[in-house]
Image (cartoon, rainbow, N blue to C red):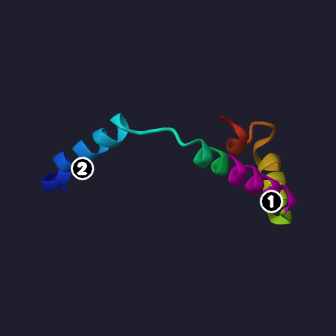
Amino acid sequence: MNENFTQALELLEHLLRNCKADAAALDGLKNRMQKARANSKANKGAIMQGLVSQATYGSKIPSTTI
């Protein structure tokens, strides 16, 4: 790990300095996230897990606390 650390750090710095925004990729990510949320709202297992979490933790559910 130590032998490649400087090269990996340089690569990371290069990526961070030269990154460019991609509106199409951002829109795709937003669409995928919205679809995943809609699918989980329709999933009975996810609904049951949410109810169990609410029964266990009350209104301060760890998965919804940001």
Taking 39 as reference, is 23 left or right? left
Say if 58 sits above or below 43 in the image.
above
Taking 39 as reference, is 66 left or right? left
Along the polypeptide, which appears first: circle 2 or circle 1?
Answer: 2
Tell me what residue is drawn at x 81 percent, y 65 percent: 45
For label 1, the SS is helix
Are the residues at dot 2 and dot 1 in contact (C-beta closer than 8 Å)? no
Res 1 quadrant in image:
bottom left
Q: Give the range drawn in magenta.
A: 30-42
Taking 5 as reference, is 29 left or right? right
Closest to the observer: 41 or 25? 25
Res 19 quadrant in image:
top left
Furthest residue in direction left, as rendered: 3
Taking 50 as reference, is 7 left or right? left
Closest to the observer: 26 or 55? 26
Amino acid of disc 1: Asn
Magenta-colored stretch includes residue 40: yes
Magenta-colored stretch includes residue 38: yes
Say if 1 sits above or below 61 in the image.
below
Q: Quadrant of the C terminus?
A: top right
Residue 52: % across, % down: 80, 55
Inter-mark Cα distance, 2 to 1: 38 Å
Q: How many marks?
A: 2
Tell me what residue is drawn at x 17 percent, y 54 percent: 4
Q: Name the residue under label 1.
A: 39
Tell me what residue is drawn at x 77 percent, y 50 percent: 53
Closest to the observer: 27 or 50? 27
Q: Mark 2 points at which residue?
A: 8
